[in-house]
Amino acid sequence: MTEPAPPPGDTSDEAAEGQPMPGASETEAESGEATRPVDKIVFGISAVVVLAVIAVGAIFPDGFEEASTTALDWVINHFGWLFVIAANVFLVLAIYLAASRFGSIRLGRSDEEPEFKTLPWIAMMFAAGMGIGLMFYGVTEPLTHYLNAPPPLELDPASPFYNDDLMRGSMVYSYFHWGLHPWAIYAVSGLALAYSTFRKGRGNSFSEAFAPLIGGRRWGPAAGRTIDVFAIFATVFGTAASLGLGALQVAVGLDLVAGVPGSTQLELFVIAVLTAAFVLSAFSGVNRGVKWLSTANALMILPLLVFVFIAGPTLFILDSWPSSIGSYLSSLVKLSSVTGAFGGEDWMAAWTIFYWAWWLSWAPFVGTFIARISRGRSIRQFIVGVLLVPSAASTVWFSILGGTAIWRQSNGVSDYSASVAKGEEYALFALLDSLPFYSLMGGLSMLLVAIYFVTGADAASIVTASLSSRGSLAPKKRLVVFWGAVTGAVAAVLLLSGGLEGLKNATIIVGLPFVLVMLVLCVSLVKELYGDPSANPLRQHLRHKGFREAIQRMVGEEVSARSDETGNRWYRGRLRFGLGPKRRSNQEE
């Protein structure tokens, strides 16, 4: 299948061989035509700040943890509402764009067909929705909500339906955190990048999507570089949080399945080994390697899902999935408006606000990926696919793994409370330990998390390298390796200075400035869409009435008739339509 070609005008200078962006063709990667020079200002500022954070965290871990906790409290107290409102803005905007006249605009030329057919495109969307996060939280989140009822549910423990309502609420909040809202964030960022790159023919840099607001202004270049720097910070710290979660889970798996005693040193060793694996892959044809590893992940995760579905409460899973989906959709407005103002602020910070900040930090990476595979699709096709397909996949994942855990806990078949109390990273292995073939399934889970670590670090570092080299489709390998190693180092420092809470704290703090960047991106996107000729109301009306087809048919008939009269099949006589003295007769022609 042909990979997406570079957008018009996306030229570049001669450079060393680079690492291709997701979706860049192998020809581009091998020839280096898509490689651009490093933006020394963007790279320099980003590298210095991130390396400074690593140094401070490694030398003064306690002080770093205290400072990050203080900063987190300030962000939550003053701007928790902003994350909630922003997430709702992204979802409403995505639905509006899909349902409005803008939905028919193509991400490319008006007559361009989708680069990928529907089934492969959906498969890649599904793959984008699966990762370390789902492996980590697939059991932990529903089970934690069941053991400690979320305050926003406002349940009455004296009610005879309390347990049923708690089980349903646990699943609903898991869907809420992994469903429409996060994928609306990705849809908006991906749409803005795809429209800017394929429709307008600009570069692939994140700041290019802001051209309607900053283009042609004296301060435009500085603003663009600032946006790219913020995007790099968000990607590095958001990815580091994911890698830290993966390292925690692999270390626990080694402890429980292989008998390797757990410790902080083991977690750091896991990060070092997997980061080294990524660096080696970058030098050995990583583009093909990542594709192979991603395919292997998809093939390995399916047996795990099917096994838990069959070994678990199959009928309960089948019954609870549509019921909890209905509850999620019917209570979406209420869930979306909770801020913690009337209680539960700590819970909101640990869950909803952390998730919104996490998804925002991943927006440059995931947005770039889905933009690159969506060339030629209409905005309506793009948004519907991005919103519905990964969201549906996430609900299935939580229904099977999380549903099995809370059913067994509720019915007294198993007790996972002690495992969850030890740490959220223990939940998945506690569930597998209560099912048959624990060693096999536990080993498979560790392998899945490890591969997700490598592929996630790889893809995110490619995007980060692209952001620091003027949106290059094939950034230089040494730049990719640098950002991959730096991301692994950030994950290690965050684990040293605060463990899981340290990872969450850093994600929320870095997410604050980037939520403002994303809101400005919405303004830029809407402004540009309103100026798109394909969205003109008159043009939409004429297209609906068939005027375009009628004119094409009339012009074709006129050319055919005159070609027959002259006997010249390549007739190039002048065609004049309309009334008045300037129109010539057939004889004059």
Image: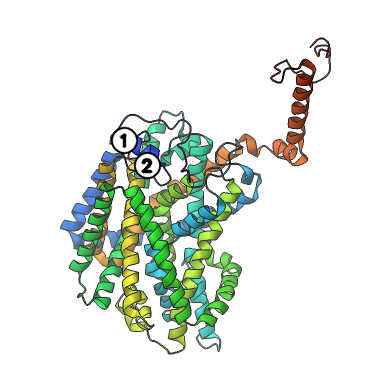
Residue 146 in the image: state x and y as whole percent.
Answer: 45, 79
Is residue 241 visible to us here?
Answer: yes
Query: For mark 2, does the 10 Å Cα neighbourhood hold few (<14), some (14 to 19), or many (20 or more) residues?
Result: many
The amino acid beneath tag 2 is: Asp
Kind of residue at disc 1: Asp
Distance between mark 2 and mark 1 Cα atoms: 10 Å
Q: Residue at label 2?
A: 228
Where does residue 369 sit, x and y in percent of width and height? 44, 49
Residue 59, picture quadrant: bottom left
State the image quarter where residue 141 is shown.
Answer: bottom left
* Vertical position of residue 316 compared to residue 246: above or below: below
Q: Which residue is located at x 61 percent, y 37 percent?
A: 111
Q: Quadrant of residue 334?
A: bottom right
Q: Nearer the viewer, mark 2 or mark 1?
A: 1
Residue furthest toward the top?
588
Which residue in the structure is indicated by mark 1?
39
Neighbour tally class for label 1: few under 14, some 14-19, many 20 plus, Cα within 10 Å: some
Instruction: Tell me the tag on residue 159.
Output: none
